Every structure is written in structure tokens, then in C-alpha cells.
Amino acid sequence: MPITEVEKIWMNGQLVPWHEAKVHVLSHALHYGSGVFEGIRAYETSRGPAVWHLDAHLDRMYSSAGIYFMEIPYSKAELVDAVKETIRAAGLQSCYIRPIAFRGYGEMGVSPLANPVDVSIAVWPWGTYLGEEALEQGVRVKISSWKRHDQNSLPSAAKATGGYLGSILAKVDATKSGYDEAVLLNDDGYVTEGSGENIFVVNGGTIVTPHTGHGCLAGVTRSSVMTIARDLGFPVVEQNLVRTDLYTADEVFFTGTAAEITPIREVDDRTVGAGHRGPVTKALQDAFFAATKGDDPTYADWLTYVDD
Ligand code: PPE
């Protein structure tokens, strides 16, 4: 998706002009995929822009970094301030936020331990992830022949740049075949997630999503949606799903920062449920977007106001 440029990017402690946020071509991360990153959204509220689950996203970035022995040279409080400062500098009421920590220029070779850890934070306006109509009409997905890498190859607990090579294969295959998104199975044939989203099914009012141990990212949106669903009175379980569970479900949807809550209307050319956004998905979207706008005091803790 195209990026709408803003004036400044935060890089290693300061705001620099957008086109000066550069790295050396021999940066470790470019050669070996040694970066960890986050995708975060800020939403417009009556009290100005507010970042959705900033704490949870930064916590995940530090724990992703820890898995790869990467020490982020800024405290969480410093990164919270940096995110706010970058949004304020861009003058945006709502935006996507992309922090990344990566092994920079230094030595060459697989071991990253001698290389510096560089950190940047970019923000830009980003609309719906899977197309204009996706949130209402739903998307068409294909089960990929590319498998989700297993926990002992690339741990799904780390949101690491290199881990997305498998997502790239699946996404390109799906879109070249005319679908909107890919769903990846693990080596045991269980459903894990989309190339950039967690996945849920609804059956008779019960909401089911794969366990993170089976190879999906512990999505921040996934856990918000599980909480919201339980608060709305829906039973939520984490359980193995096979591909036919997606074909026969009443409703299927994706969750993710970029995708928010996106209904899935077709899986492998089979119509899911009524073929459009179902009532449970709609109820979850309504509650989710009310919370992101700051309209639901129950979830007030999930917002960090940029101008506070
Ligand atoms: N699984 C994967 C593989 C994934 O990349 C994401 C986020 C999720 C699940 C959902 O996680 P969360 O955002 O914490 O609810 N994908 C990010 C990047 C998408 C991209 O195209 O880049 C995102 O949604 O920001």
C-alpha cells in the first residue's frame, strides 16, 4: 500500500526529515532480517489523537528484541514520548505507527552481537488494510500451500522482520491467484493466521481462535477482541482449527492493527455463512471502534492520549 509521507521520522533519538531517515547498505538487518518491529494505530478521539494499546505493543517489541539478544537502547518511557512526539510533529489526528529496532552497520557475518541496535519510529496516515470495502463486505482468502514456520525455526512470539519472508510468499501467491489474503497452516495442518492478521471463527455464538503455541503471533488486537467478546457475553476458546472449520463456520474474521476486524466472506472459493459480514463480527466491530474512539470508558486504559 502506498505510504503518505509526513515531514519527520524519529531516528535514534531525534526527529529527522523524512528522506534523511536512512541506513547503510551493509546494515546487518538488511542482510539477515535481524529487526523487530511493531504496527500500532492512533485513533482520533474528542481529546485529540490517542494511541491504541501503546504499552502492549512496546512490551512486545522489547520481548521480541530479547529473544534475539537485542538490547533496545531506550527505555519504554523514552519510546512512549518518542511516539507522541512523532505524531505531534506530523500533526495527524489518526495514523499508523511503525517502530522498528534493528541491527545496524558494524560487522558483517551472521552473529549480530557486535552490531549497534538502531531504532526508528515512522507515522503516516493508513486507511483500511485489505481494501476500502473490506470492513463491511469482507475479503476472500486462500489457504496457502506455504506453511507457517514452526516454533523451533522462527519463534512466533517474536515479531521479527525476517519472519515475514514466509508471509511474503503466501501473500503474493494469494494475491496473484486473485484472493485478498492468505491463511497459513502449520506443519500439523492446523490453521495459524493470515500473512499479517490473526484469525477467528464463530460457531453458534462461540468464538474460536488458534492458540498462540500453534504458531500465530500473540496479536494485541486478538487479545483486545477476546476481552471485548467476553464482555459482550460470547464464550471465547483457544483451540486447534483445521481448514474445513473455516469452510463450515457461521462467520470468520481477521484481527490485526492494520486489518482491525475484517470479515472473511470466502475461504478457498467456499462462501462462509451468509457470504457477508455476520452479526457477531458486526457487534465486535462496533464495540472495538467505540473503544478506539475513546467512547467506552470500560477500555479507557487501552488509550494513550498524545497531547496529555
Ligand atoms: N499476525 C501477523 C503475522 C501479523 O503481522 C500481525 C500484525 C498480527 C498477527 C496481528 O497482530 P496485532 O497487530 O498485534 O493485533 N501485522 C502488522 C503488520 C501488517 C503489515 O502489513 O505490515 C499490523 O497489523 O500492523
Image (cartoon, grey):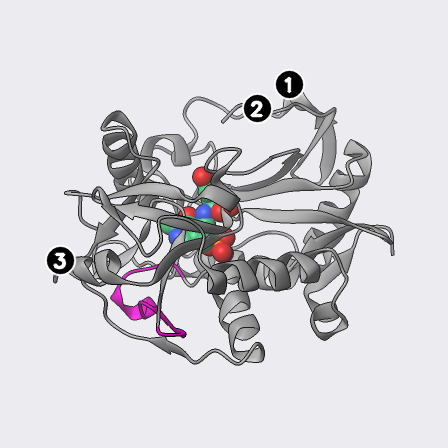
Specify the label residue 148 is tagged with. none
Q: Nearer the viewer, residue 30 or 275?
A: 275
Amino acid type of disc 1?
His
- Dot 2: what SS? loop
Q: Earlier in the sequence, mark 3 or mark 1?
A: 1
Q: Residue beneath label 1, please?
A: 19
In front: label 1 or label 2 = 1
Q: CA distance from mark 2 to mark 3?
A: 38 Å
Amino acid type of disc 2?
Lys
Position of residue 202 measured from the top left corner of the image (x, y, whole percent): 37, 67
Specify the label residue 187 is tagged with. 3
Residue drawn at x 45%, y 33% is 106
In front: label 2 or label 3 = 3
The quarter of the image holding the C terminus is: bottom right
Classify residue 79 as left or right of residue 1. right
Query: What is the crowding at mark 1: few (fewer than 14 residues within 10 Å), some, or many (at least 20)?
Result: few
Q: Give the extent of the magenta segment.
A: 204-217
* Badge 1 residue CB within 8 Å of ligand 1: no
Q: Nearer the viewer, residue 69 or 217?
A: 217
Q: Earlier in the sequence, mark 2 or mark 3?
A: 2
Tell me, yes or no, whether the two marked residues, 1 and 2, touch with CB atoms within 8 Å: yes
